[in-house]
């Protein structure tokens, strides 16, 4: 049998490959209540951080364009808004978006986990 792999060798490679697989965090074996709670907390926090970062990037871009255009077009803005003021306007919009979205996402995830735990008890 030229070109074929012997069955013993293919079985050992398959077993070795399956043993090296790392399960995803969602597929963890049964955890204790405290471990599951810590895992859910970490997962909700990460979800909130990523959602906040996305919102901050969008808000930063959305506030940068009109601010920079306004400074070049509107005479009052050109005279009164220096680089520091422009940066403050843009960064304050991004920071506010980050904290608002991150907070809402974390609370929504925590509420979802609480409802899931409550449904398990029924």
Image: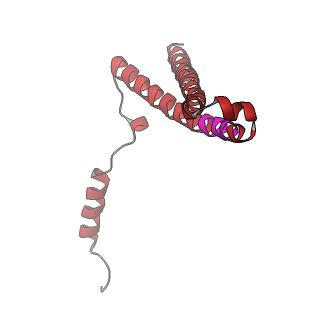
The boundaries of the magenta stretch are 59-68
Is most of the magenta stretch helix, strand or loop? helix
Q: Residue at x 60, y 29 (%)?
A: 89
Q: Which one is in front, 46 or 72?
A: 72
Is 14 located above or below residue 85 in the figure? below
Q: Nearer the viewer, residue 17 or 100?
A: 100
Q: Is residue 61 left or right of residue 18?
A: right
Residue 65 falls inside the magenta stretch: yes
Q: Residue at x 52, y 35 (%)?
A: 53
Q: Is residue 117 left or right of residue 97?
A: left
Residue at position x 75%, y 36% from top?
74
Query: Whole-percent x and y of residue 39?
Result: 38, 26
Quarter of the image holding residue 51? Answer: top right
In the orientation shown, which residue stands out farthest toward the bottom?
2
Q: Quadrant of the N terminus?
A: bottom left
Q: Position of residue 59 (x, y in %)?
A: 62, 34
Where 112 sits versus 18, above or below?
above
Q: Is 76 left, or right, of 52 in this rendering?
A: right
* Residue drawn at x 51%, y 19% as measured from the top left: 110
**Depth order, front residue of 40/33:** 40
Residue 75: which quarter of the image?
top right
**With respect to residue 65, does 102 lie above or below?**
above
Query: 25 or 93, which lies in front?
Result: 93
**Residue 76 coordinates in the image, percent (x, y):** 73, 30
- Check the image and report above or below for 11 versus 90: below
How many marks on residues? 0
Q: Quadrant of the C terminus?
A: top right
Q: Position of residue 68 (x, y in %)?
A: 65, 40
Looking at the picture, the colour scheme in use is secondary structure
């Amino acid at each position: 049998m030229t070109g074929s792999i012997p069955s013993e060798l293919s079985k050992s490679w398959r077993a070795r490959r399956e043993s090296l697989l790392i399960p995803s965090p969602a597929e963890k074996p049964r955890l204790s209540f405290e471990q599951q709670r810590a895992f859910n907390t970490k997962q909700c926090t990460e979800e909130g951080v990523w959602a906040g970062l996305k919102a901050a990037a969008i808000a930063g871009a959305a506030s940068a364009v009109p601010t920079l255009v306004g400074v070049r077009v509107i005479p009052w803005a050109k005279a009164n808004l220096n680089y520091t003021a422009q940066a403050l306007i843009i960064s304050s919009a991004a920071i506010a978006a980050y904290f608002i979205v991150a907070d809402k996402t974390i609370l929504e995830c925590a509420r979802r986990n609480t409802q899931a735990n409550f449904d398990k008890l029924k």
